[in-house]
Amino acid sequence: MPKKLKNEKGLLKEALRLIMVDAVKRGIVEFEATDSHDLKIEYAYRLLIHDKEISPLPRGQDTLPKIRHRLAMWVTHKLPDDHALLG
């Protein structure tokens, strides 16, 4: 498992927010209140792969903890350098 990022939970939350806002704006997804958090994480991961924003994890290593980490890492490159989550 990769080293955990400082504020990884907050970074994951921000990554999901950014990805979901974009996906809804593009009209490619509509989430229900009953959709699980894990489902949203997996969808966000697959959408970033489809959009060629990230490369997929190797087959068999695409576990939920690693997907969460990958999303958190992705958002670190999208946030401004002075963002509170990066401090």
Image (cartoon, grey):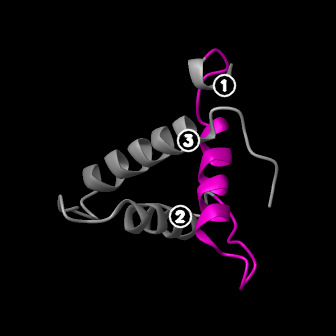
3D distance between C-alphas at marks 2 and 1? 21 Å
Residue at (63, 62) in percent of width and height: 65
Residue 26 shown left or right of residue 72 in the figure: left
First to last magenta residue range: 54-82
Q: Amino acid at mark 2?
A: Tyr
**Residue 34, placed above or below residue 75:** below
Q: Return the disc, 1 or 3, that comes first in the chain's sequence.
A: 3
Q: Which residue position holds label 1? A: 86
Circle 1 crowding by C-alpha within 10 Å: few under 14, some 14–19, many from 20:
some
Mark 3 or 2, which is nearer the eye? 3
- The residue mark sitting in front, 1 or 3, is 3
As displayed, is residue 17 above or below residue 33?
A: above
Which residue corresponds to the image point at 34% horizontal and 56% vertical from the top-left? 23
Tell me the residue at 38%/62% (across/down): 40
Horizontal relation, residue 19 to residue 36: left or right: right
CA neighbours of label 3 inside 10 A, class few (<14), some (14 to 19), many (20+)? some
Q: Quadrant of the C terminus?
A: top right
For this rendering, which residue is in front, 31 or 24?
31
Return the x and y of residue 85 as percentages of the image width and height: 59, 25
Q: In this figure, which residue is indicated by the disc labeled 3?
A: 9
Query: Farthest residue in the bottom direction?
Result: 60
The residue at 81%/55% (across/down) is 2
Amino acid type for the residue under numbered disc 3? Lys
Label 3 to label 2: alpha-carbon separation: 16 Å
Residue that carries the numbered disc 2 in the rendered image: 45
Q: Is residue 12 above or below residue 32?
A: above
